[in-house]
Image (tube, helix red, strand yellow):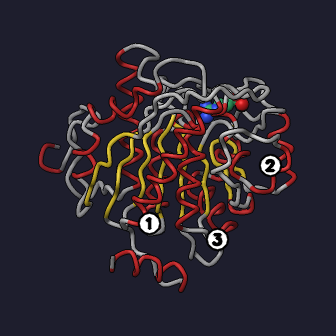
Amino acid sequence: MNVVRTFVRNMSQGKKWEPLRKVGIIGVPFEKGQKKYGVSVAPAAMRAARLVDHLKEIDGLDVKDYGDIETVGSSENVNVDNMTHLSSVSACNKKLSECVSRVLRDGRIALTIGGDHSIGVGSVDGHYSVNEDMILIWVDAHADINTNKTSGSGSVHGMPVALLVKELSDYWPYLPTMDWQVPKFSIKNLGYLGLRSVDHYERLAIEKYNVPAFAMEDVEEHGIKKSIKHILQVLDPNNEKPIHVSFDIDSLDALEAPSTGTPVRGGLTLREAISLMEIIHATGRLRALDLVEINPALGNESDRKRTIEAGLCVLRAALGFSRKGTAPRGVLDLPVQTHSNK
Ligand SMILES: NC(=[NH2+])NCCC[C@H](N)C(=O)O
């Protein structure tokens, strides 16, 4: 209880932030926000790859696994034009939102393992309920800011940002089953990194609201460190706001993370993603992190392994793993060169 009070006070008084040394893992085996089988297997695959042990290797990190969100499909049959499986998406996200809020109130960083990116709705909603001053960094090849009227696919994983931001609420029809989710988060608190597949209307929205968006050509021009620092500076010049990072594995180059449903070539290197996450960690303000769109059913065994390992590396960097400490065991299955064996 004391922890929670200190946490809340830090927020409102703009005190110096320290990285939170406690994390709560939430698995979301959900895939109805897109059309391919397999992304719902990711939480189990990550746990089988020793997710918890890898995080526990981080010095001083207290890791608690909250288990998986129940994702049995909703029985309600709602029909919204060009929006597939809305009632299931809604039911899963409602539970996730409550769970993310609970983890945060327990004084832990909420680490959500998807699932497809439609679960960003519940994750951000749950975070916003606890920290209304949060900023959101969407790390992704795609902008995921379509509405059902602009989407070419009808898949909700391309729509979560548009569902979340209050500025776009008038562009939606009434969405049955979604009454629990009132869009309150402002698009002014959103930044993008890694974009390279942005649909026509998505681009218009990003330009209209002047969203700080670093596409791959910008990352190439400025480098990853300046890119993320610039986004943080624009969204939070006084370094006082809690950060939510929603990390889609397809932000990585398809060679680094092949097992994903909508891969796009020409993305971030794993090294860049790690560097980005180290900077986020160093702010001390990371409070929620999503890792989504790992699909272990796509590609061959080596693709699957590479993708999961990349995900683990990203999470470790975000949660404070330091290469100066003990060498990572079994993450990359490579001999680690140290001074003693050089
Ligand atoms: N999170 C993702 N992988 N999103 C892919 C979205 C692709 C496309 N823009 C769509 O709306 O369908």
As drawn, the residue found furthest toward the left would be 340
> Residue 325 at x, y = what percent?
23, 58
Sequence-first disc among 3 and 1: 3
Location of the C terminus (image quadrant): top left
Q: Residues within 10 Å of mark 1 (few under 14, many from 20)?
A: some
Residue under label 1, please give it: 282
Do residues under tags 3 and 1 come within 8 Å of each other at their CB atoms?
Answer: no
- Tell me what residue is drawn at x 68 percent, y 60 percent: 185
Q: Secondary structure at mark 2?
A: helix
Closer to the camera, 5 or 300? 5
Closer to the camera, 55 or 79? 79
Sequence-first disc among 2 and 1: 2
Q: Residue 129 got which mark?
A: none
Q: Residues within 10 Å of mark 2 (few under 14, many from 20)?
A: some
Residue under label 2, please give it: 206
Closer to the camera, 67 or 176? 176
